[in-house]
Amino acid sequence: MIITDAILNANSGHAVFFLLTSYMEAVGFDSKLLPQVVTKLPFTGLKDLMIRYRFIVAKLQRPPLNLDITVTAMEETAEVFWAALLRLRILEHDGRDAHMRCEQISCA
């Protein structure tokens, strides 16, 4: 997926959040696809992103009533959020975004 490639190659946490915001604006265009807790903007940081990711994962672990576009959108969004969390952790580890500490939450 192109957005995950861009996120995984971002040079800073600011770039990661810029790409996430752009993705959310595109996906949020159809407000029925994802719950507002996932699509609301702006992102307020790493902890906010982790909360949204965990929300999606929890929803996906429940058996769907029917396989529909919402499940597909949630799976895609989970993949995008996971890529962002991974990239932010790498940037933090490399010292490029030391202000975004992963130690305070579980980024894995």
Image (cartoon, rainbow, N blue to C red):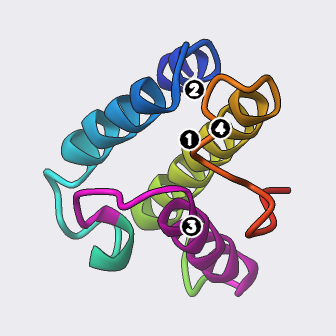
Is the C-beta separation of discs 3 and 1 under 8 Å? no
Residue 1 is a magenta residue: no
**How far apart, in angstroms, are the residues tagged by discs 1 and 2?**
6 Å
Is the C-beta separation of discs 1 and 2 under 8 Å? yes
Task: Determine crowd level at label 2: few under 14, some 14-19, many 20+ residues with C-alpha closer than 10 A.
Answer: many
Numbered range of the magenta stretch: 39-63
Dominant secondary structure of the residues highlighted in magenta in the image: helix
Callout in the foreground (4, 3)? 4
Q: Quick one: label 1 or label 2, which is nearer the N terminus?
A: 2
The quadrant the C terminus occupies is: bottom right
Task: Determine crowd level at label 4: few under 14, some 14-19, many 20+ residues with C-alpha closer than 10 A.
Answer: some
**How far apart, in angstroms, are the residues tagged by discs 1 and 4?**
22 Å
Observer-nearest of 104 and 106: 104
Residue holding disc 2: 4
Q: Please provide percent x and percent y for residue 103.
A: 80, 60
**How far apart, in angstroms, are the residues tagged by discs 4 and 3?**
15 Å
Q: Quadrant of residue 45?
A: bottom left
* Picture layout, residue 81 above or below residue 8: below
Task: Determine crowd level at label 1: few under 14, some 14-19, many 20+ residues with C-alpha closer than 10 A.
Answer: many
**Mark sitting on residue 98:** 4
* Picture layout, residue 5 above or below residue 31: above
Residue holding disc 1: 80
Q: Please provide percent x and percent y for residue 59.
A: 61, 81
**How far apart, in angstroms, are the residues tagged by discs 3 and 1?**
16 Å
